[in-house]
Image (cartoon, rainbow, N blue to C red):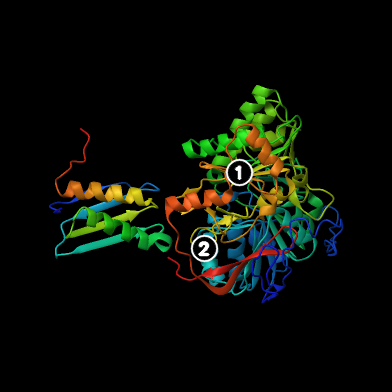
Amino acid sequence: MQIVKKAQAGSFESSDIMVLVEPSEKPGRYIEIDSSVDIQFGEQIEYAINRKLDELQVIDIHLIAKDKGALNLTICARVETAVKRAAGVQKGFIP
Amino acid sequence: MKNVIGRNIPEYINGIGKVEPFLGAWEKLKKGWMDEITVPPPNKAKLPHQCKSCMDLKTAIEKTNPHDGMTVSFHHHLRSGDNILVMTIDILAQMGIKDITLASSSLNNSHDSLLKYLKDGTITKIWTSGLRGELGKAVSEGVLDVPVTIHSHGGRVRAIHTGKIQIDLAVIAASAADEEGNATGAHGKSAFGSMGYARIDSRYAKQVIIVTDNMVEYPCTPTSIQQHYVDYVVKVDSIGDASKIATGTTRITKSPMDLRIAKLAADVIENSGMFTEGFSFQVGAGGASLAVAKFIREKMKKSGVKGSFLLGGVTSYGVDMLNEGLFRAIFDVQSFDAAVSSSILKNRNHIEISSGYYANPYNCGCMTNKLDIVVLGALEIDTDFNVNVITGADGIIRGASGGHSDTASGANLTVVVCPSFRGRIPIIKKRVHTIVTPGETVDVLVTERGICVNPKKPELEESLIKAGLKIKKIEDLQKEVEGITGVEKPIEFTDKIVGIVEYRDGTIIDVIKQVKNAN
């Protein structure tokens, strides 16, 4: 999937994750994670994000994640939504 | 050496001395007398009509012979609105006093500004029930050379009686006082209710200063603190931030998860065999535990069962239950909201008690020993039912021992309520980071994902199953939760001990190590 614009998904609530994505300036994935549980789960969060990006076939992306202790399934859902919005595949608005 | 629950405890700690390892909750007490002697309180004298009033706190402190290495004590009834503790230490620091032992009944976020005194050698030792905020973080990162001693509310009284804590100066904030030092927290603009934790200090400290922002005509009643223990009296503009001392009434949580846990816990209590005419009851003031009171109140009204007494930290919710006739008395060591103060003042069945009467293990029967049911929270609980209420998920001190181990030890039925995980961090663990309350004193764990009964209580498990409640093995629940959150990477620590956790009988149940990679 091709990231064509900025998009976000999630919230800053406890047990959620805010995922912001945009086209990367250089080729490749640039992932920044800031997590309240970085010590305990930092590696697992990065792994979960990367596997989801693999699944969505995203090669070039700048992704910023602000995590407040989201579970893996929440992380994956937020990444998927943010990517689909940024790729113009899905519009994340309720009119 | 390892203590009886498998925690590594050194035999000797610099600045603390020889360490007595934890032996089991009742092992030391069961013979009925204690080998430690009671250290005598000081004898003092005043001449008739001698004036105790001082123009300000500094003048009073100057009269008490402040010196390097002194122990200064405080109570924490002003909660996070406290001004007096920091004001006192500021004055001592300006006088150039060093090497102070701080022995407050607890410490909280209002004491963050003490951090500079931990760094510059003004304060070198701390005794407290709780530690939070900047202080908790700095201590966990090793700011002090001597480990902090964490005690329970009952354990603090024992430590003072036996001379482990020898108070040179007690500075006691009161919301009303008279010129002789009779003082109370029950009325005045900064009213905070019971003064339960301060009584022991007034009795044993070499020097006692009462600080109030509300001098009343003699005599000040009720005499929560009595004049014959008081050396000096000081009037200040404000003892603290009234909005943080007591905030209206405590509301029951609206969190669906806390309510779900509380509902389950109330069902456990109802079917425990303990919910009978004349039962005594204590709940914590935290989210899920206070909410249990709401459901118990409903069950009492429906069934007609009446209780005998409510104990502990008291909220307006407890006062309502007293006024409705659901309980005959409240024994109040610490009040949590504004509505409680007026009840202490007006209702003779709402009785202010000292922390010794409340929970001291070294006497002929504290109130916690008479408890039927207690509901407590937890930061962590492990598959042996050991509870941590002092260190957070990152290993940093951010909690309080309080009456947790005292009440758990005393009650017939100890119910721990907590979510199974919080913000991805499992609360149920194979092993808690720090043990404050030993698993042998915990009977049931109630989480939103199920109820676990301590295998030491098979009859209880049987009656809960009979009542149709679903019981899980705690090991199964632990694995279930780990399956949801993932396996945590363990926190790293150095070998430096930054805190020791005293069990209520003075033995050491656990130690807290310095965190390695603090954020």
Q: Are marks 2 and 1 in contact (CB under 8 Å)?
A: no
Q: To which quarter of the image does residue B27 belong?
A: bottom right
Q: Name the residue located 54 percent from the left edge and 35 percent from the top edge.
A: B252
- Which mark is drawn over residue B190? 1
Asked which secondary structure carries label 2, the reply is loop
Mark 2 or 1: in front is 2
Closer to the camera in the image, B196 or B51: B196
The image position of residue B30, as x and y in percent, is 83, 56
- Which mark is drawn over residue B395? 2
The image position of residue B49, as x and y in percent, is 82, 52
- Which mark is drawn over residue A37? none
Q: Name the residue located 87 percent from the left edge and 58 percent from the top edge.
A: B33
Q: In whole angstroms, how far apart are the C-alphas of marks 2 and 1? A: 35 Å
Label 2 chain ID: B
Left or right: B59, with B31 as reference point: left
Closer to the camera in the image, A61 or B14: A61
Mark with earlier residue (2, 1): 1
Graded by Cα atoms within 10 Å as few (under 14), some (14 to 19) or many (20 or more), the crowding at tag 1 reads: many
Left or right: B207, with A3 as reference point: right
Q: To which quarter of the image does residue B74 belong?
A: bottom right
Identify the image quadrant of the C terminus of chain B.
bottom left
Asked which secondary structure carries label 1, the reply is loop
Q: Amino acid at mark 1?
A: Ser
Label 1 chain ID: B
The image position of residue B46, as x and y in percent, is 84, 58
